[in-house]
Amino acid sequence: MNNLQASLVAERCQRNWNAKKLVSDEHVNEIIKVATNMPTKQNKEYYQLVASTDQTLNRQIYNVAIDDNNDGFKKQFHRNGQVLAPLLLIWLSTNPVGDKFDDSFIEQFQISIGISSGAAALHAASLGYKTGYCCCFKWGIVSSLLKAKGIKLSEQSVGHGLTLGIGHAKTDYRGDVLVDKKIRLSLRNDGVDCNIEKEIMVHKI
Ligand SMILES: Cc1cc2nc3c(=O)[nH]c(=O)nc-3n(C[C@H](O)[C@H](O)[C@H](O)COP(=O)(O)O)c2cc1C
């Protein structure tokens, strides 16, 4: 698939996954390389990346992919099924580092994970996978879950992280949320808009 076709896949959010069609190790490593080769300002390490194919962990993270202030999440199953992917990439900040240019660490962290994750999504899509972003989490619990898995996180991580689910679709409609092998809800009837067409203003000079 070329980049133009892949960008149309990456634009959308896949919320159900075929648990039997995994992301190959070769592809996991390739996607990680693409993501982490992307530039950062002064090539500093503003983020760390976790790549989880651990379905128990991904399920635990899905369980906290919620916003307590939003009534839409006050139910047993919620819409962020993208997190239940065979491969879940998680971008988190490093410890804030000083900079002789006085750059804002949080700003550069956010820019860096945008660039990195965009390349990861595009590359995954070009390899034939579907992708789904999520940024809504109880981040403190996500950190605790990762630490419990032995992942050494920065002590002073700042800002919000970002995740990207990668895998193959299970149902024909990407807005179906499949948990424990059943469609638990569908964006069609969950009051969340799907398939919005955006029009970015572009100026060609
Ligand atoms: C950076 C980023 C963060 C996102 N976070 C969430 C999220 O927390 N919850 C959610 O339901 N969708 C999230 N999405 C999915 C977008 O809302 C979705 O990509 C958009 O609606 C277009 O895809 P669709 O047509 O499949 O809905 C996120 C997307 C991006 C790019």
Image (tube, rainbow, N blue to C red):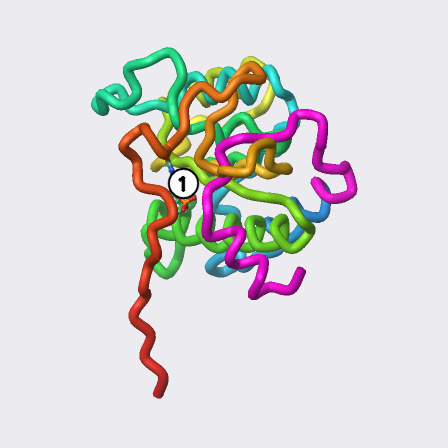
Q: Nearer the viewer, residue 161 or 58?
A: 58
In the visual, does 37 lie left or right of 27?
left
All told, the count of numbered labels is: 1
**Amino acid type at image mark 1:** Pro
Range shown magenta: 1-28
Percent position (x, y) of residue 103? 34, 56
Q: Which residue is drawn at 45% across and 22% down?
A: 142
In the visual, does 125 lie left or right of 26?
left
Q: Nearer the viewer, residue 198 or 113?
A: 198
- Name the quadrant of the C terminus: bottom left
Residue 130 forms part of the magenta stretch? no
Q: Residue at x 40, y 40 (%)?
A: 96
> Which residue lies under the disc numbered 1?
96
Residue 15 forms part of the magenta stretch? yes
Q: Nearer the viewer, residue 126 or 182?
A: 182
Q: Can you say whether 102 is above or below 17 in the image? A: below
In the visual, does 99 lie left or right of 115?
left
- Name the quadrant of the N terminus: bottom right
Q: Quadrant of residue 156?
A: top left
